[in-house]
């Protein structure tokens, strides 16, 4: 009894302090060497690198945009259009999506899959997704806005999920959080492609309108944190979570839910767009938080991690 009374109190985990504190070179090396050095174990570190990646992406995008704005005012050189416009479009389309990919990887609680492999999966899934989406839109684009929105949601969710599920199957890891990771990476690839498309269309005729580019970039950045990567991540999670998923009604219910969230997000009534986008985004984020937290807890419990109880509330 005396030993219990004299036990040191459990140190409360401070996620903000952990996120913004200075991290050592060894911590940077550990993150990028996961899955490369043959060591397994678990990742119990609160995500921190994604904020630094976002700060870098935001700073570079802001710098390029300012330079392009000044060049448009005082310089008419064709080189600005050749080099400046594509750079700003590329930076605007990846400014939020690359940090999101890093964030999802940091949440993955196992040290058995390298980040470079995740990037490769993202590129391959994105290529297949783009092919399927373009083929689908070549086949049919309904004139009715309600049917068009439904077709978009079904086509894009199928096109993202198919390569993601094939990748999960081929990689052979029966870990639901791994399924979420691969599905989310496919969603990030789709978001990058879509964001680049919106920005490119905005600069179709007369070059980049700086104000319009900033508006679209900010809008896409805000919506990307609760869109494609979560919807496809849920499908990837369900594919691993449920036994015989293609014959399991629970898996198809998750697929339907993801498609429904996509449909509500694109709801074809402009007067309700703010409400529908906010509702879809809120539900998506809640589902992600519940699933990721639960799966991380299951992994930590399986690994008999003593420090999990103190760290779980901060996640």
Image (cartoon, rainbow, N blue to C red):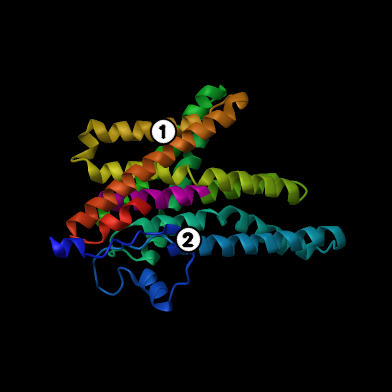
Q: Quadrant of residue 75?
A: bottom right
In this orientation, which residue lies closer to the viewer: 26 or 195? 26
Q: Residue at x 47, y 30 (%)?
A: 263
Between the residue at mark 2 and the residue at mark 1, the CA separation in whole angstroms equals: 27 Å
Q: Position of residue 92 (x, y in %)?
A: 62, 54
Q: Decide whether residue 188 is among the magenta residues.
A: yes
Measured along the vertical axis of the image, is residue 108 above or below residue 204?
A: below
Evaluate whether residue 250 shows in this view.
Answer: yes
Q: Report which residue position mark 2 lands on.
A: 50
Q: Report which residue position mark 1 lands on.
A: 259
Q: Is residue 16 left or right of residue 79?
A: left
Q: Residue at x 57, y 48 (%)?
A: 221
Q: Decide whether residue 232 is among the magenta residues.
A: no
Question: How many numbered discs, if any?
Answer: 2
Quarter of the image with the N terminus is: bottom left
Measured along the vertical axis of the image, is residue 81 above or below residue 141?
A: below
Label 1 residue SS = helix
């Amino acid at each position: 009894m005396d030993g219990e009374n004299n036990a040191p109190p459990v140190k409360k985990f401070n996620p903000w302090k952990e996120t913004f504190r200075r991290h050592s070179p060894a911590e940077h090396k550990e993150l990028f060497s996961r899955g490369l050095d043959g060591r397994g174990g678990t990742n119990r570190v609160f995500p921190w690198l994604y904020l630094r990646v976002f700060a870098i992406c935001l700073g570079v995008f802001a710098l390029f945009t300012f330079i392009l704005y000044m060049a448009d005012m005082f310089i008419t050189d064709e080189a600005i259009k050749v080099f400046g416009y594509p750079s700003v479009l590329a930076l605007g389309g990846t400014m939020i999506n690359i940090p999101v990919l890093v964030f999802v990887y940091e949440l993955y609680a196992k040290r058995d899959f390298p980040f470079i492999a995740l990037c490769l999966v993202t590129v391959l899934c994105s290529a297949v997704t783009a092919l399927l989406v373009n083929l689908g839109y070549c086949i049919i684009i309904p004139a009715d806005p309600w049917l068009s929105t439904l077709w978009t949601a079904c086509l894009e969710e199928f096109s993202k999920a198919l390569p993601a599920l094939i990748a999960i199957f081929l990689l052979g890891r029966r870990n639901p959080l791994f399924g979420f990771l691969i599905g989310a990476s496919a969603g990030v690839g789709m978001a990058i492609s879509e964001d680049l498309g919106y920005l490119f269309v905005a600069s179709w005729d007369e070059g980049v309108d700086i104000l319009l580019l900033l508006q679209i970039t900010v809008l896409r950045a805000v919506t990307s944190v609760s869109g494609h990567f979560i919807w496809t991540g849920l499908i990837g999670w369900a594919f691993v979570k449920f036994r015989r998923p293609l014959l399991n009604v629970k898996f198809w219910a998750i697929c339907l839910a993801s498609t429904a969230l996509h449909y509500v997000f694109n709801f074809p009534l402009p007067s309700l767009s703010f409400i529908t986008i906010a509702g879809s985004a809120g539900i998506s984020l809640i589902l992600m938080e519940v699933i990721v937290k639960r799966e991380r807890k299951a992994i930590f419990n399986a690994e008999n991690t003593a420090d999990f109880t103190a760290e779980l509330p901060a996640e």
